[in-house]
Amino acid sequence: MAFVLVHAWLVWLNLAAPGQPLGDVTGVYRVWAENAANDWLRMGIDAPWVYPILAFLPMAASLAFGSDWYAQTWLVIVTLLNAVAFAVLLGSAGLSRPRRTAAWWWLGFLLLLGPIALGRIDAVTVPIAILGLLMAAGRPRVAAVLLTVGAWVKVWPAALVAALVIASRRRGEVVGIAAALSVGILGVSLLAGSGLNVFGFVEEQAGRGLQVEAPLAVVWLWQIVAGAPGVRVVYSQDILTFQIEGPGADAAAALTTPAMAIGVLAVVLLGVRAVRRGAVFGRVLPPLALAFVVVLMLANKVGSPQFIAWLAAPVILGLVYRPRRFAVPAAVAASIALCTQLIYPYWYGWLLAANPAFVLLLTTKVALLVALLVWAIAALWQAGARRDSAPRSG
């Protein structure tokens, strides 16, 4: 009942709340789907696209009941995916306290995050990622399939594949399945006539500027608050986002990619260290997955509000494996979700105008993400601090 009530509320917010929370779904996804249905333009096939190729599947499926019902169909699809992940989280046997805790936390997190939890393509990948992580220990091959599919919808679950490869003793199977499935997806795309457009999402992301919600953007937003000349928020017609324009902004955007690479490498080394020193699967995978996800958020030139939905997957896994240990990151992630909803969609215009209160709110959100990364790194370091004689699973 709680699941139904929470999702009914989120559906209502998406359809009726101010700020156009379903703007991307009805104004962008639907256009792409209609163009393909009319054989005018297939994004990712006939032209480069900002998303990996499988992102088109839920967008096209939402046309099943016609264009007029596109938004409602989208929300039903996302709700059903969440329902599947929620059912697996609860399990069919006697409900354990950790799983009950994780389930209640997820519902609270969704409420705090608000309509954006359902209203973007990321909402499709989150339940897939949750399912993959929940199956990682007992069924790593199934987990590899799910996480790889998620990565071909929106790139971020690829970080969870990397976490699974590091933490699992069956890493060879995980790599083999992920590679084979990726080759298959690429092969089908090439047969459909995509050519190099299938990799267009790499180029499209590389060409972005510093988006207004990006963690680094707070530096320039505070300059706008202080009245610095030549710094402003502008709208990009090319990628349909608000970006920072000002001295050093383009250089900062360019630096995010090497910064992300360095951050990911550091997390990889911490994870490998923990595994080599005998840390058990349940001590490694949750903080490793969390660290990867937060690095992708902090070292990101985009920083869209829907990215916060990614936190649900590693936090739920942590609450299942080590509920007491993950109480702190769960609370921090929930706070980040609340900060996100306060900014978007209702009062987003105040951030675009660099209102000091909302710039402070975004700064607080970034600081909480940094705190979450520090916690995950500390947990990984502690996991590898001593050699563990306990048997490893996964």
Image: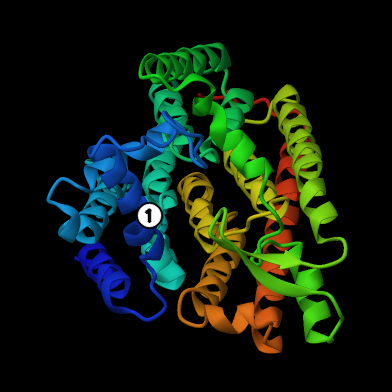
Q: At 65% across and 83% down in the image, what residue appears?
A: 353
Q: At 23% across and 48% down in the image, what residue appears?
A: 62
On the rendered structure, is 240 left or right of 260? left
Q: Nearer the viewer, residue 340 or 345?
A: 345
Quadrant into which the N terminus falls: bottom left
On the rendered structure, is 94 left or right of 228? left
Whether residue 30 is visible to the viewer of this picture, yes or no, is yes
**In x, y percent, where is residue 105?**
42, 62
**In x, y percent, where is residue 10?**
31, 69
**In x, y percent, where is residue 303?**
62, 58
Q: At 50% across and 24% down in the image, what residue appears?
A: 394
Q: How is the image coloured?
A: rainbow
Q: Is residue 235 above or below residue 200?
A: below
**Pointer 1 local density, CA inside 10 Å: few below 14, some 14–19, many at least 20:** few
Q: Nearer the viewer, residue 336 or 116?
A: 116
Q: Nearer the viewer, residue 286 or 175?
A: 175
